[in-house]
Amino acid sequence: MRFAICSAAYPEDPAFMTDFFAGIEAAARGHPDCELVLAVEHGFDAVEALAQDRAGRLRIRMDRAPRPTTPAGLRRRMLAAALASDADIVVFADFDDRLEPEALGLHAQALAQADVSYGDMILIDGAGRRLGRRFFDGAAIPDSFVGPDAIVERNFLGFGNTAVRRASLARADLAVPDDAMPADWWFFTALLSDGLRACRAAGPVSMYRWHARSTLGGAPAATSAALRTRAGLALSHYAQLVDRVDAASAQRAVERLIRFIDSGDGSFAALAPALDGCPAVWFEDVARASRAVTEMPADVH
């Protein structure tokens, strides 16, 4: 079985990058036909020294961006580089996270019956300390599903906990918009809209680092402003996928949520019961808050 571990490489905390490469080496051990494929941000020359330290233990191929990119644009280069590999299975890894040693085997097992594999993640802080929680905790994540419906309102498929058969990737539209945010939500929604099947891995596949620069992190929004920002991202996401999936109902619900948040300072307190115990899965907070607003009397919003 041939594996390509693929990541978007950009300037990051040196400790994060060291941990990333250590995780890649541990995951690749026992899989001799494995390469690391990096889409490298323009001007990120420091990655060369990091890679050279491991050149004797791990095959590394780099695709360097010829000019500055957006985060989504760099992921688009990553996907194209993954498709250009000769791997059977493409495993995604985030540059500030760490793959679990069993990740490749767990993904391969899930992909025996699916096109896409997804696994749980162990939450850690910026220093790498375990937070005693997993990303999927309390989220009722399905064991398998077909099509994009399971990730229309929320997303649990990221570029740090998934793998794809390269043959299935070849069927995909890799033209991730430059302003797609988050790019992983756009990509997996578009990919699964072709009727592909996704299957959950039998165990956690990575450690998800929740730090100060995390875009979404490992917890629901804690303020009205944060929830408003996430709702805006969701609304933009739906607009970019309007010709691919039917997200009209979810889009209207998020629009109502935004109007409700913008209506006054007391709006977040009114949503607190809906967000109590909300799991870490991305945009679960937006989905729960949107449903709560939809269920309110019409004169409230």
Image: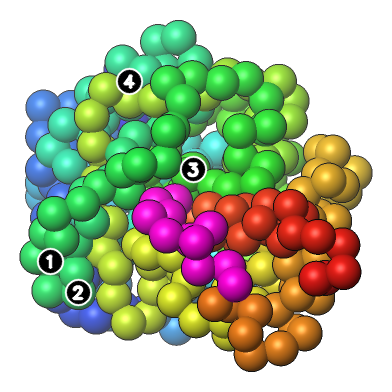
- Name the mark on residue 157: 3
Residue at horizontal 54 percent and vertical 39 percent from the top: 84
Instruction: Name the residue that disc number 2 marks.
Output: 126
Residue 110 vs 257, above or below: the answer is: above
Q: Is residue 174 magenta?
A: no
Q: Determine the CA span between mark 4 and mark 1.
A: 26 Å
- Say whether residue 57 is visible: yes
Query: What's the amino acid at mark 3?
Result: Leu
Task: Tell me the quadrant of the picture where the N terminus can be found.
Answer: top left
For this rendering, which residue is in front, 34 or 136?
136
Q: Determine the CA span between mark 4 and mark 2.
A: 29 Å
The answer to whether marks 1 and 2 mark residues whose Cβ atoms lie closer than 8 Å is yes
Residue 5's quadrant in the figure?
top left
The answer to whether marks 3 and 4 mark residues whose Cβ atoms lie closer than 8 Å is no
Instruction: Name the residue that disc number 1 marks.
Output: 128
Residue 8 point in image, percent of width and height: 43, 61
Residue 221 point in image, percent of width and height: 48, 71
Q: Element type at marker 4?
A: helix
Name the side, left or right, on which 144 lies relative to 243.
left
Label 4 vs 2, first from the N-terminus? 4
In this view, the mark in front (3 or 4): 3
In this view, the mark in front (4 or 1): 1
Write the start and end of the magenta stretch as one range. Answer: 270-281
Q: Element type at marker 2?
A: loop
Query: What's the amino acid at mark 2?
Result: Gly
Q: Is residue 277 magenta?
A: yes
Residue 209 vs 98, above or below: the answer is: below
The residue carrying pointer 2 sits among few (fewer than 14), some (14 to 19) or many (20 or more) residues within 10 Å by Cα, namely: some
